[in-house]
Image: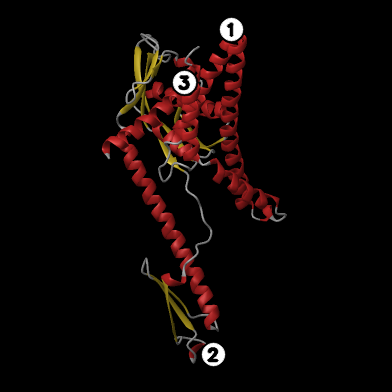
Amino acid sequence: MADFPTALAEIEHALTQIESVLDPEAKRAEIAQLGEEVAAPDLWDDQENAQRVTSRLSALQGEVERLESLRSRIDDLGVLVELAEEENDQASLTEAENELNSLRSAIEALEVRTLLSGEYDPREAMVTIRAEAGGVDAADFAAMLLRMYIRWAEREGHPTEVYDISYAEEAGIKSATFQVKMPYAYGTLSVEQGTHRLVRISPFDNQGRRQTSFAGVEVLPVTEETDHIDIPEADMRIDVFRSSGPGGQSVNTTDSAVRITHLPTGIVVSCQNEKSQLQNKAAALRVLQSRLLEQARRDREAELNALKSDAGNSWGSQMRSYVLHPYQMVKDLRTDFEVGNPDAVFDGDISGFIDAGIRWRRSSENDAA
């Protein structure tokens, strides 16, 4: 037990490094601000905003509580070790050693969270699973993967919502799409993207032959819908001119028509149907906002298609094998992380694979840089 002080100092340093990245003080300040918003009597007048605020508040509180709990456990462990050594209490020393190992695991898992720094990593995730080559076995395998991810989310305490399931004729599913509603779900699950392979004795083969089947997993960030776009005055050129066409005297004889040019995009809108310049300007702004909103939607769609293309690089290549015969093993072919208990994996015990994948991705990015 002579290494206890060193081990304790190492995990304390690791937690300090994590805190420097996650910045709990900034999170506490945001929690206070969101708490004021939650307390507002008119919060639920805008249900979409209320859900966003309460969800963000809950997520931040969970993160801060997790950091505070780890810090408290480290402090308590130091006191326990000190007392145990003074009294030469072997049982307490054994308890302290178990707690030390538990803290190491918890801090290592939290450390992975600091590696999620991509633009879309904080988003919730939309996951699609598709049966690929392998016939009915592939459809059954896709259903097994769907259950695996839903069970993982349940074990982690994250809600999911299944949007669509297309069932296969004999067994399993052709495809399924579901959302994982947690902060950083996309950054966490994006490493699951790719082709998964199952090797087993087929339960659908009367001759009991070994069958290899494939299923694809696609992970995309959930888009953030916006119902209003603020347009800086500096981004617009506003021209007024005399209306043309049918209309009364006030329409045709004054410079009441308005043309707005959005300088960053070149979008031009005009309105001349209202009686006053102010009314035409307000109407033109509404049209411009709608045009920009639609363009933003198209841009997001293009970005998601680009992400799909990036995912496609791994979509056709196997990233994980689940072998049930002639031996029992699940192995990630990128990270070499493996376990010998496929039943546990299919029951949602995949955090080890996810953590290893996130570390592998960061290492690959650093090597590429």
Q: Which residue is outermost to the left?
A: 368
Please say if the residues under marks 3 and 2 sit with CB atoms less than 8 Å apart: no
- For residue 187, the mark is none
**Residues at marks 1 and 3 touching, judged by CB atoms closer than 8 Å:** no
Q: In the rendered image, which residue does mark 2 sit on?
A: 250
Which secondary structure lies at badge 3?
A: helix
Q: Which one is in front in this view, the residue at disc 3 or the one at disc 2?
A: 3
User: What's the CA distance linking mark 1 and mark 3?
Assistant: 19 Å
Is tag 1's residue or tag 2's residue first in the polypeptide sequence? 1
Q: Is residue 314 positioned above or below 240 on the image?
A: above
User: How many circles with numbers are drawn on the protein?
Assistant: 3
Q: Which residue is at the front of the view, 311 or 53? A: 53
Query: Which comes before the other along the chain, label 3 or label 2?
Result: 3
Q: Amino acid at mark 1?
A: Gln
Mark 1 and mark 2 residues within 8 Å of each other at the beta carbon: no
Q: Position of residue 247 (x, y in %)?
A: 51, 87
Q: Is residue 323 above or below residue 267?
A: above
The amino acid marked with disc number 3 is Thr
> Looking at the picture, does residue 232 appear above or below residue 114?
below
Image quadrant for the C terminus?
Answer: top left
Query: Extreme front residue here?
Result: 86
Can see residue 41? yes
How far, Cα to Cα, is label 3 from label 2? Answer: 85 Å
User: How busy is the neighbourhood of tag 3: few (under 14 within 10 Å), some, or many (20 plus)?
Assistant: few
Lower position in the chain sequence, tag 1 or tag 3: 3
Instruction: Measure how far apart labels 1 and 2 are at the Cα level.
Output: 95 Å
Q: Which residue has dot 1 on it?
A: 90
Determine crowd level at label 2: few under 14, some 14-19, many 20+ residues with C-alpha closer than 10 A: some
Which label was assigned to residue 6?
Answer: 3
How busy is the neighbourhood of tag 1: few (under 14 within 10 Å), some, or many (20 plus)? Answer: few
The answer to whether residue 176 shows anywhere in this view is no
